Image (spheres, rainbow, N blue to C red):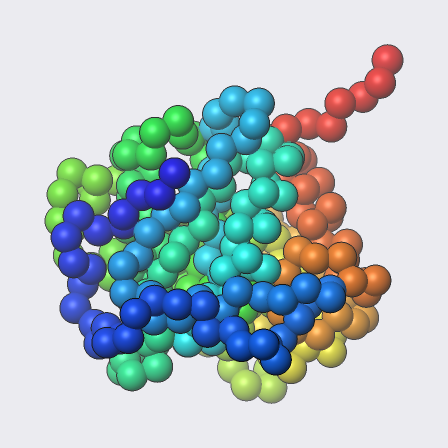
Amino acid sequence: MVIPIWPDSPPQWNAPTEAEKDTSGPDGRNVAGRSVIRLGNVSVPQLHVYIPQHGSSDTIVLIAPGGGYNILAWDLEGTEIAQWLNEIGVAAAVLKYRVPTKREEVKWLAPVQDIQRSISLVRSGQISGVQAKTVGVLGFSAGGNASARAAFSETRHYEPIDSSDEVSIRPDFGVLIYPAWLNREGTTDLIDELSVNENTPPMFLAHAADDNVSALSSVAIYTALHQNKVPASLHVFGSGGHGFGGRTDGKPTDAWPDLCATWLRSRGWARPVAIAP
C-alpha cells in the first residue's frame, strides 16, 4: 500500500528536474554480497506501508533510509527493514522522502517535514489497516539525522494544511542506526539545535566504532538522554563500518536487529516471543 504524504505539492523546495530512478550502476556498492537500490531524484514523497501477516499492529514504525540527503538506500535501509519489523509483529512504513536536498539552505528541512507529516497521517488514522497507539521512527545515517530531529523537536516545520495536522508530530520512540552529524565535532556534546526535555521519547541506538561517520554522534544522543533520565539503549560495536543496514555479513553489527527486537518487546511494542510449554 502506497500513501501520498502531501495532498498536493509538498512545501516549497528546489525539486530535481530529472525523473526518479535507481542511480546505482553496474559497479555500485554491494552490502553482504548484494547490490543496493540507490533511489534518486525523489520529488513525490510517499509512505510504503507494510502490515504484519498475522493482522494489524498497534505499533507502527516509520523508516527513513539513509543516503547523505542525496539518495535513499531504498532496499538496504528501507524495504528490508520493513519486512524484518513485520516478522516481529510490527507494522512499518518506508518513507520515500525528498532528495536530493544538497541545494537547500537547510538540508534536513524537507526530510523532517516529510517525517512530521507522516506521523500526523498515522496518528489521525489516515492509513488503512493501521490503528496505531504507538508511532516510532527508525532512521539510518542521514535518515537517522532527520529522525532524531523529528524526535527531539516540538515545532512543526511546516504550516498545517488539514485536520491531520491537529495531532502531535512527535514520535513515541526512536531507533537510530549510525545516525549522522548529531554531535559537536570531536565531542560527545549534542549539537546546539537539539535539546532533551521530559517529552523526549526513549531511543535505541546502534553504531560501529570504525564507522567513518563518528560513533560519537550516537554517544552524544545517549549521553544527553541518560543525563536527563530518558530511557535509552546504546550499542557501539567493535567493527562493521557504515551502511550495513539489516543484512548479515559476519560482523559484530549483525547483532543489532535482535537487540533492537528485544528492546521493542521489553517496552511492549513488538510481539512477545512464544515460549514453549
* Image: 178 above or below 204: below
Q: Residue at x 29, y 83 (%)?
A: 103
Direction from residue 111 to residue 203 in the image, left or right: right
* Image: 107 above or below 260: below
Identity of the residue furthest to the bottom in this view: 186
Check the picture and name the quadrant holding the N terminus. Answer: top left
Check the picture and name the quadrant holding the C terminus. Answer: top right
Front-most of residues 165 and 10: 10
Direction from residue 244 to residue 227 in the image, left or right: left
* Image: 151 above or below 72: above
Dividing the picture into quadrants, the one containing residue 172 is top left
- Residue 73 appears in the rendering: yes
Front-most of residues 39 and 135: 39
- Residue 138 appears in the rendering: no
Front-most of residues 128 and 229: 128
Identity of the residue furthest to the right in this view: 277
Q: Residue at x 43, y 41 (%)?
A: 49
Q: Residue at x 66, y 71 (%)?
A: 30
What x and y, as percent, mark residue 222? 60, 62
Identity of the residue furthest to the front in this view: 26
What x and y, as percent, mark residue 270? 61, 33
Q: How many marks?
A: 0
What x and y, as percent, mark residue 208? 71, 70
Direction from residue 257 to residue 72 in the image, left or right: left
Q: Residue at x 56, y 53 (%)?
A: 175
Dividing the picture into quadrants, the one containing residue 206 is bottom right
What x and y, as percent, mark residue 37? 53, 65
Identity of the residue furthest to the top in this view: 277
